[in-house]
Image (cartoon, grey):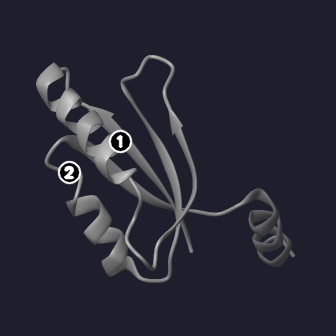
Amino acid sequence: MKFMLTFTWAPDTRSRAEAIERFEKTGGLPPEGVKLLGRWTRADLGGGFDLLETDDVKKLTEFAYSWNDLMHLEIAPVIEDAEFGEVLGRVLK
């Protein structure tokens, strides 16, 4: 299953600097069992988005825990348009 993780940094520049330092040390990679499909940073540098794939929500929670002390995180399951089209094909009959 795919999940979109949205992160935002607090205006606190010290926390943001600490998050950047942690990212540089770790690469910001999720734990084994969670695949990083893509990562984007907002142009205003206020946060960004990670597209993740896993069948193990516990591993996703582990990843969130490793960052939620420095930034606000939101995680939502997502579906691709082609898959959504299949759903619509079934329910709109």
Label 1 and label 2: CA atoms lie apart by 9 Å
> Residue 28, which numbered label?
none
Image coordinates for residue 3, horizontal then vertical, percent: 50, 62
In the image shown, does 15 or 47 lie closer to the viewer? 15
In this rendering, the answer to whether 40 lies above or below 59 is above
The residue that disc 2 covers is 68
Residue pictured at 51% horizontal, 20% vertical: 43
Image position of 18 (left or right of 60): left
SS at mark 1? strand
Q: Image quarter for residue 93?
A: bottom right
In this rendering, the answer to whether 63 lies above or below 22 is below
Looking at the picture, which amino acid does disc 1 mark? Phe
Looking at the picture, which amino acid does disc 2 mark? Asn
SS at mark 2? loop
Image coordinates for residue 72, horizontal then vertical, percent: 24, 42
Residue pictured at 34% horizontal, 41% vertical: 24
Closer to the chain start, of discs 1 and 2, is: 1
Confirm whether residue 70 shows in the render: yes
Image coordinates for residue 41, horizontal then vertical, percent: 49, 32
Residue pictured at 41% horizontal, 45% vertical: 6
The residue that disc 1 covers is 7
Image position of 31 (left or right of 9): right
